[in-house]
Image (spheres, rainbow, N blue to C red):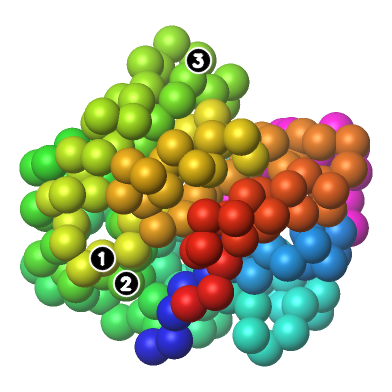
């Protein structure tokens, strides 16, 4: 497969403040966001499939849509599949999907995920975040350990990501960043997405 984009937008409609998701997506796409992970655990499969259709209406064929924790939806729609850490152990081999990603929080979870030959990992939570109150981040040292456990696999850092932290997480071995609140909760999502893209470019990671 071709190289994955370095910036992943993770959905959380609770952060939209009444704004419409497709509108936010269009703004983010304008600023260069090319991969979106739909993580809406309380929605039905039917509703998530509707989201996938709407996302594709507002993006081009080069943009990637990934669904969190729903292998059947991924299979029916051709979307990528992202497995939360507690689902990884349910599979003995890589599930049928176009793109596979896994969440990891420990070396043991990295080892379990590697059995499935994922295309990428999402590691964290790196820094404290409002979406997971009371959860202490693993920090840059923890991120560095997780990336070292996954040689050859692109690792996205997640958790409290801000444009100013891109340099540090790339320095700790991350391939890119997975972002939710910083973009979705912003008054100008496109501007914030653009700041992430600029920070990634400055680290020499935007292409490839």
Q: Which portion, as a residue range, is magenta? A: 9-23
Q: Secondary structure at mark 3?
A: loop
State the residue at coordinates (40%, 58%).
175
> Given this view, does label 2 or label 3 mark the residue nearer the observer?
2
Circle 2 Cα neighbour tier, 10 Å, few/some/many (<14 / 14–19 / ≥20): some
Side of 176 relative to 138 (left or right): right
> Given this view, does label 2 or label 1 mark the residue nearer the observer?
1
Q: Looking at the image, is mark 3 or mark 1 earlier in the sequence?
A: 3
Q: Residue furthest top?
A: 134
Circle 3 Cα neighbour tier, 10 Å, few/some/many (<14 / 14–19 / ≥20): few
Q: Looking at the image, is mark 2 or mark 1 earlier in the sequence?
A: 2
State the residue at coordinates (54%, 81%).
77
The answer to which of 111 and 196 lies nearer the viewer is 196
- Residue 1 on the magenta span: no
State the residue at coordinates (21%, 68%).
152
> CB atoms at circles 2 and 1 under 8 Å apart?
yes
Mark linked to residue 90: none
In the displayed structure, 189 sits above or below 126; it is below
Q: Looking at the image, is mark 2 or mark 3 earlier in the sequence?
A: 2
Mark linked to residue 119: 2
Q: Secondary structure at mark 2?
A: loop
Counting from the top left corner in percent of width and height, residue 9 is at 62, 54
Find the distance from the CA under tag 2 to the CA under tag 1: 7 Å
């Amino acid at each position: 497969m071709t190289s994955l984009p370095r910036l992943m937008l993770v959905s959380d409609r609770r952060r939209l403040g009444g704004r419409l998701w497709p509108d936010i997506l269009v703004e983010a796409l304008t600023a260069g966001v090319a991969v979106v992970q739909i993580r809406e655990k309380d929605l039905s499969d039917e509703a998530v499939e509707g989201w996938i259709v709407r996302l594709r209406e507002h993006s081009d064929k080069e943009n990637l849509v990934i669904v969190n924790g729903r292998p059947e939806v991924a299979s029916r729609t051709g979307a990528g599949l992202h497995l939360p850490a507690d689902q990884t152990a349910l599979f003995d081999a890589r599930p049928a999907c176009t793109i596979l990603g896994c969440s990891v929080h420990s070396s043991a979870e990295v080892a379990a995920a590697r059995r499935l030959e994922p295309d990428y990992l999402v590691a964290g939570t790196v820094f404290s975040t409002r979406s997971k109150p009371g959860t202490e981040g693993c920090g840059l040292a923890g991120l560095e350990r997780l990336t070292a456990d996954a040689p050859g696999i692109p690792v996205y850092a997640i958790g409290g990501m801000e444009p100013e932290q891109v340099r540090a997480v790339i320095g700790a071995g991350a391939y890119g960043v997975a972002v939710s609140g910083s973009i979705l909760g912003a008054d100008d999502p496109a501007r914030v997405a653009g700041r992430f893209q600029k920070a990634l470019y400055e680290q020499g990671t935007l292409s490839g």
